Image (cartoon, coloured by chain):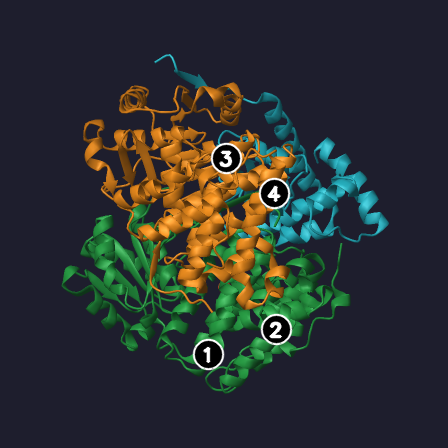
Amino acid sequence: MGDYREVQAGSKPFKRAYIAVMLWFVGRAIQAAARVDKAVREEFEKLPEGFTFSLGVQPHGPYMIVGKNQKGRVKYLGWKPESKVVDLRMAIKNIEAALLLFTFQESTAISICRDRIDFDGDLPPALTVIRAIGIVEVYLLPKLISKLAIKRYPVWSFGRKYLGRIRIYFHSILGY
Amino acid sequence: MRIQDYYEFIARVRIVSGHDVLEKIPDELKKIGATKPLIVTDKGVSGVGLVDVLKNALGEKITIAKIVDDVPQDSDIRIVQRLAKEYREVGCDCLIALGGGSVLDTAKGINIMVSEGVNDLMKFTGKGVVKKALKPLIAIPTTAGTGSEMTQAAVIEDHEKKLKKLFVSPFISPDIAVLDSRMTLTLPTAITAATAMDAMAHAVEAYTCLGKNPMSDTCALTAIKLIRENLLTVMKSPDDKNGRLALANAATLAGMAFSNSLPGVVHSLGHSVGSVCGVPHGVCMAILLPYGLEYNLHKNEQLTAELLLPLGGEEEFVKTPKHLRAERTIYFIRKLNQDLHDVSDHRHARFFKEVLDREGKRMVPRERLPEIAQAALGDGTVIYNPEDLDLDDFLMIIEASWEGVPLDRSRIKKG
Amino acid sequence: MYKPESYEFFCPIKFSSGSRALENIPFELEALSARKPLIITDKNVTRRGLVRKMITAFKDSGVTIGIFDGIPDVPDMQLVTELSNIYRNGEHDAIIALGCGSIVDVAKVVNIAVSYNVKILRDLAGDNLMAHPLGPFVLVPTLTGTGYETSKFTFIEDLTFSSYFLMPDLVVIDSRTVRSESLQTTVATAMVALAHAAEAYTGPGKNPITDAYAYAAIQYVKDNLITVLTKPRNKEGRLALVNAAGMAGCAFSNMKPGLIHILGEAISAMFHIASGICMGILLPYGLEYTIQKNGYHTYDLLLPLSGFDEYAGTAENLKAEKAVNIMYEMQQDLYKVTGKKIPRTLEEANVPKYMVNDIAEKVFKDGAREFGIDDYRMVLEHAWEGKPMAHS
Ligand SMILES: [Fe+2]
């Protein structure tokens, strides 16, 4: 029996913390982008009132929840999915896959193609959310990096790109 | 060939192929320990006597619990619910789906309901939501096209609420696919052409879209070759049993490929033309396939060029200079459509304005193209397409494919 | 033109291959309703740090894992009993084999033992005697394959078990567990895969689905083996070779063993040479024999071996010959890049000439009657001498 042992695999606190911060920031950035950017606003307009989605890591998080309130405003709703009714759940299969995604080594599309994300809910809203995240990434990241995160780098006016970027950073950090 | 940085592949379906293999089903059922199948099929299939062929093949060895043959062209939630109820009432312990995509989707839906013991199927929409093994499901495809006997997905519509729900999980795929040449022998030539082009689209898109992997690649190459070598001969002599079986195999291989490497823009638009105008899926695939390749060409030149080998044959491949091969591939798809058009008394459509309903009316009116483009934005397959698409891109493709003119490639946005 | 005929095919394996593949295991186990896996491996694997990699992959999953790393090269039933007890007492509900060869053999037999009962194991040895699926079984292979890991076969003591239920539910190939191995081991792993795949591709049971698995395996071995031997740092190549080994096992489970396999195993057992090395020697000769017997299947072999351009540019009647020549060239290359460590002929493998006849007779006597004794002898004689059969 000397060759047998039981191991309780530990945790990855630093990786989790990084993902938690990224999710928090992306969640608030989506909220900000929905105010600032016309394309993101239009994407979210397609979704029904009260629509809520979560993006997180299986099995124990972290998560972010974003939803549309009664007035049609897109809001970051925190990191606790337990207490909320979520219409669309996007779950990254493990923390390493989340890391690939949030260190922009894999684009959202590639991550899905490699079967690293599960969906619980309908597809059209999921696509809306993915497109919105794509636009947010263009705002938040330098071109060199966001080119890896999306399929086709868009041609935007100077104002949309740089002024928009400043406004979204500003709103995300201040949270309104 | 380079190995992918990461890939997954699964094809858990047992395949039984041959000319008289329905007869093996009783033994197969015995192996899984099932005795009372519910047979799900549609009026078209039972109308041409295929249910009788199946009944004879099963013989005395199997008590068929019940046969239902009223599955509509598009699977609907209500029929799924009704049949799940019947399954339970009769006390069945397995399912046999005899038909095309809709019948199989319906059977997959029933299977989720009866295995999970629920009355609300919609709880299970999404990817990876069904998490446990379901009841035995045997698929007997009667069209050589959809390949859904190999896929892990089911699409169930709620026509009343105008919703289309997608269910994806490895547990949804059938346990056994029985490819018997008798089942496709009576398929009318126009449908043979359309469904074969669906399989062709599965193979081509699996090979050229983002989910590609070594196994989906080899399945796709073989499928394309089998279709090229057999489709036109079967069109000319529909009784060619070997050709029919080859096409059925091609569809299954293509199903294996695209189940593991999901299709792209051809399917995004194809699904939308189907849901907006009711054009049969295979017809959309045949028309859209060359356009999808054209649209992605700047990202996919090498892969598209490789397809010239299975599509054009060896001589053609050698004789075409490397830099022209991709365009030649697209030419061969268009040529195949043209040939099918010619041998089918012009019933095989080459572009959307040519698609007519029974009364000879256009199924796709030009003014509905924007609506189609809009719907395509909500189709999941967009993700798997190598190049991104916005509303204008979809509109550009659908307009060109309606008119029947090649894409103006200078208009394609290349990030 | 090749048309599919009557055939059956089954392969329940899900492949997950590439970067961060190991980290998928907790998720996949969950999908198989398993919460407490038992990892079976050996000291060598532990020493190389792979067990540590596995434990890291389980971090954050909340799963407790059991690890047994005492599998010897020649395991026995005693060990199976011991492991079954560990499995039961530790309340494990899945088996993960980390490694190849005897590790996987034991893991498969233990899976039978815990799903049935250890006492009736002997009754289940044979062909398809298991009536129901076994517990969840995950394979994480290294580059040390013997050709059976992903197959439906397993062996222990004098027993052979064969059932589709023995194939893994999941095969996880991660670049981090696919370390470089000794030249002989790498070549043996690759060549057994190539031999099985080539025989599946050209044999009488050929069908389009087996072909798909075989094609990928052939191509990966051809494109990567020499590179991996000359550039041990080439991660991608090693990943491809282990993929090839996995796929070849699936093909092998859906065909009748061919001549190369039968003779290769026999020589391996009689002279204690790795079966992959034996099959590597026999490969071109066996194929030449197949060409003479049923040439129409063989020409297609050139496609995965040479790629699109060369295949398309070669006349139909020369394709089979060219495919065999590629195999011969590969033997020469292996001999060269390994500093003559990989034998090209049975003579170089130190098989005495006078034993050639004995091998043929033994194979035939042991029940491999698919081929005639003269056929066996002919292939062996040519492979001993290193003389192509094309013109005899
Ligand atoms: Fe399709």
In the rendered image, which quarter contains the N terminus of chain A? top left
Label disc, if present, on residue C24 of the rendered structure: 3
Q: Amino acid at mark 2?
A: Phe
| Closer to viewer: mark 2 or mark 3 | 2
Identify the chain of the residue marked 2, using the numbered disc in the image.
Answer: B
| Closer to viewer: mark 4 or mark 2 | 4
Q: Position of residue C305 (x, y in %)?
A: 56, 53
**C274 or B189: which is nearer to us?**
C274
- Which chain can be seen in green? B
Label disc, if present, on residue B233 of the rendered structure: 1
Mark 3: which secondary structure?
helix
Q: CA distance from mark 4 to mark 2?
A: 40 Å
Q: Residue, x 49% and y 47% (percent of image)?
A: A121
Label disc, if present, on residue B332 of the rendered structure: 2
Q: Could you say which quadrant of the image residue C98 lies in?
A: top left
Is there a contact, CB below 8 Å, between mark 1 and mark 2?
Answer: no
Mark 2: which secondary structure?
helix
Look at chain C in the picture and name its colour.
Answer: orange
